[in-house]
Amino acid sequence: MIIDTHVHLDDARYMDDIEDVLKRSIDRDVKKWIIPGADPKTLKRAIALSEKYNDIYFSVGVHPYDAPYYDSKYLEQFLEHEKCVAIGECGLDYYRLPDEHEAIAPYKKMQKEVFLDQIKLADKYSLPTHSTLLRCLNRLSQKRVVFYTVTMPMNSLSSSLRVDFILA
């Protein structure tokens, strides 16, 4: 069985053809979907989809680009929902940094703080993180992770990682 662990079905682009999108993926043997919690503004749509379709699940979190909008209290109200399966999409992402040089360090600091707070939420609710980061996870208590971007050989990943992981 194939489970798509990173599909933004809550994106507005799929609003009009969600049935077709699901059918095409079913035709390719995908049986379950997890919508990553990247943007708090689309979280309620992700939850609505998970409630409408038996095999759609969601995670709760904020992508690093949306770190300024992070509100743990808002996200926490959804963590015990029966279809919530993870925290994230969380991590660090420095691809699009502010143009002003003096704004870069505070932006990176905010991303780190938000990432660490989401890991604490994962621990508190015994949920895995949906993450891009390896080094930070080894220093923390988080023990279950779904990686969706890995740029190292598998033998290096498995020997350096002290957590249970799923490579998506």
Image: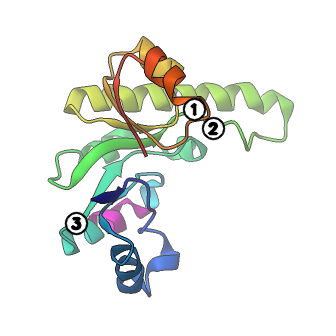
Position of 133 with respect to 26 (left or right) is right
The residue identified by callout 3 is 55
Q: Is residue 122 above or below residue 14?
A: above
Quadrant that contains the N terminus: bottom left
Which residue is painted at 39% across and 33% down in the image?
Answer: 118
The residue identified by callout 1 is 111
Which residue is painted at 17% across and 52% down in the image?
Answer: 81
For the residue carrying disc 3, how many other residues have a C-alpha within 10 Å: few (<14), some (14-19), or many (20+)?
some
Q: Secondary structure at mark 2?
A: loop
Sooner in the amino-acid sequence: mark 3 or mark 1: 3
Tell whether label 2 touches label 1 (CB within 8 Å).
yes
Indicate whether residue 43 is drawn in magenta. Answer: yes
| Nearer to me, 8 or 68 | 8
Q: CA distance from mark 3 to mark 2?
A: 29 Å
Which residue is painted at 30% across and 32% down in the image?
Answer: 122
Disc 2 marks which amino acid? Asp
Hey, which residue is sitting farthest front in the picture? 155
